[in-house]
Image (cartoon, rainbow, N blue to C red):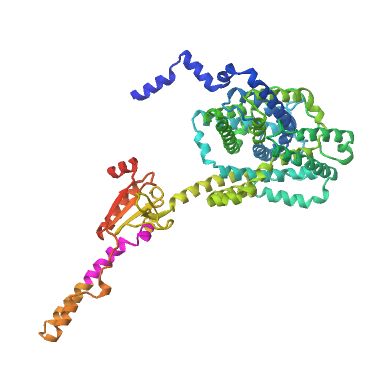
Amino acid sequence: KELILKKAREVCTCTRQTVVTFFCRLFPVLDWLPHYNVKTQLLGDVISGLLVGIVAIPQSISYSLLANQDPIYGIYTNFFCSIIYVAMATSRHNFVGSFGILCLMIGQSVNRHLQLAGYGDGSTGSVLVGNSTSSSNGTGACDRSCYAITVALSLSFLVGLYQILLGVLQLGFVAVYLSEPLLSGFVTGSSLTIITSQMKYLLGLNIPRHEGVGSFILTWVDLFRHIQNTNICDLVTSLVALAVIVPVKEINDRYKEKMKAPFPVELLVVIIATVISYYFSFEERYKSAVCGDIPTGFRKPTLPDTNLFSSLAVDALPIAVIGFAMTVSLAEIFGKKHGYTVRANQEMIAIGMCNLIPSFFYCFASSAALTKTLLKESTGTQTQLSGLVTSLVLLLVLLWIAPLFYSLQTSILGVVTIVNLRGGLRKFRDTPRMWQLSKLDTVVWWTTMLSSTLVTTEIGLLVGVCFALLCIIFRTQRPRAMLLGKVSNTEIYEDQSAYKQLSSIANIKIFRFESSLYYANKDYFKTVLYQKTGVNPALLAAKHPRVEARANADTGDSKSFSGTGLGCLKPARRRAEQPPADTRPQPIDMHTLILDCGAMQFVDSVGLSVLKETRRDYEEVGVRVLLANCNPSIRRRLREG
């Protein structure tokens, strides 16, 4: 009670210094902004912010398409998130905004709710009246586009709420269960799903968007079924854009160290394609799908639809986990590279705020974006002030430039999305090397990738996490076990099967078990111990009474027969006093067994019982059991047990 009261008083003490410290930890910008060096840091931040903003324009529009939203909402998302993250981030290099994999998961959830609400794929005629988010004309009726953003912003609110709760409750350790092979496989599988979903835009096909198990295969079946309806204009435009963007991006990647800034080929292609589409009237002459009207300015803030929370609660959880995992991992990578400290729980609160607050301003869920973060770091950003410069670039688009993208073909947006997924597809080239390093990690990668692609992204993530945990259990359930030999003239002991010319000590065997001893591997421990030492005390103990009984019976028979007084049977009596060879106890080639416990981190109650049983069984056959290299926690457990 006294301890609890003492801690409560320490936490609840409110002084001026405590308040200042609290706000500086919650808003790290208050800590670093007063020390900002304009001469050495401003130029790098401005250049980096401008370049990231230029790249963010086409990606904001293309990722909106992936999230099943109008283009303007992607620009809103990147604008608001950049401002909020500047104030709350401990990372100097992360860029938070629309991220392809999250947009895919958002689009799947939005499409599912659109179908439940009675909207077909691409339909605009139906309306819902009285929804919390009214359409832009202010009539109170909600069309398909309005309902889509209502679902997305409600989802973003829940995602932000989850992430803030995880940060406040100091649950950042949850991210450690998303291993690098698991995340890599998930990114690759999601990339394949995104590419599949964008193929209909590249071909100009009007096919429904499939959801749920098998959507990847069903989408490809529909693509080949309607291949004869391909829009030639969209196809040619897509191929030309790919032929221009891919080589230039490869050149940017190859010579990024020599180039001061990467060439903004995506924005250039978007501008040229928009101009050509406008002057040659692709929409009227060739029926090409275009972005259409993109409004300028900002809309009035709105509240999320609480009626949707119950149906979105499950969808929000994997989005929240993937969002903070990507944000924290990227922050820690660049923090370590540039020598500054990143607070994982503060990053979770920051990304949570980047989803919670913008949900009132028609934004969908976001996280740290890999490509733009890499661009930001490579172009010399010094602080998060570059995020404000990026927001200014996007503000220009929101206020004046957005309507100029009316004639931009959706096929170009599909190309921009696909090109930015090259990093995920390159992981296939790393699998042979991964197989050489760790076969189990490679199996985790393939399992997560295939389940994310062929089932669904959410189920794929769950399958990957469960399978990775099973692999950890498998590793501890059947660990390596060996007999040790001594290196000549040293006190070093190594595996006898791995090294030659190791000397073994006569009648002493040293056994190492390279895992903790607990309930899941107790049977394997005994099996491999008996196998390596060649001595199964249970079998020897069971065989020994039978040997003695048989020897006694044979001796008794010979005594009764030799009592006849015949002198010729005296040699037979002497022979009978010695039991037959097959009844003699088998000699044991050791008198001491040493268990090397150096690799054991802990021993549970079941493992303790196994050690007791092993000691008792071996002592019954004349073998002494000793324990070596026990850590303090195991020694304490042995004393208590």
232, above or below 535, in the image: above
Q: Quadrant of residue 65?
A: top right
- Is 406 left or right of 190, judged from the image as shown? right
Depth check: give the residue in front, 114 or 316.
316
- Is 157 left or right of 297, judged from the image as shown? left
Image location of residue 157, percent across then percent down: 61, 30
Residue 536 shown in magenta:
yes
Image location of residue 176, percent across then percent down: 51, 39
Depth check: give the residue in front, 505 or 564.
505
The answer to whether residue 187 is seen in the rendering is yes
433, above or below 283, in the image: below
Q: Quadrant of the N terminus?
A: top left
Is most of the magenta stretch helix, strand or loop? helix
Image location of residue 205, percent across then percent down: 79, 45
502, above or below 563, in the image: above
The answer to whether residue 151 is seen in the rendering is no
- Is 229 left or right of 618, judged from the image as shown? right
Tell which residue pokes out farthest to the left in this image.
565
145, above or below 231, in the image: above
Q: Quadrant of residue 404?
A: top right
Q: Quadrant of the C terminus?
A: top left
Residue 433 shown in magenta:
no
Which residue is found at the position 40% from the left and 22% from the top? 8
Which segment did they paint magenta?
528-549
Image location of residue 464, percent across then percent down: 56, 46
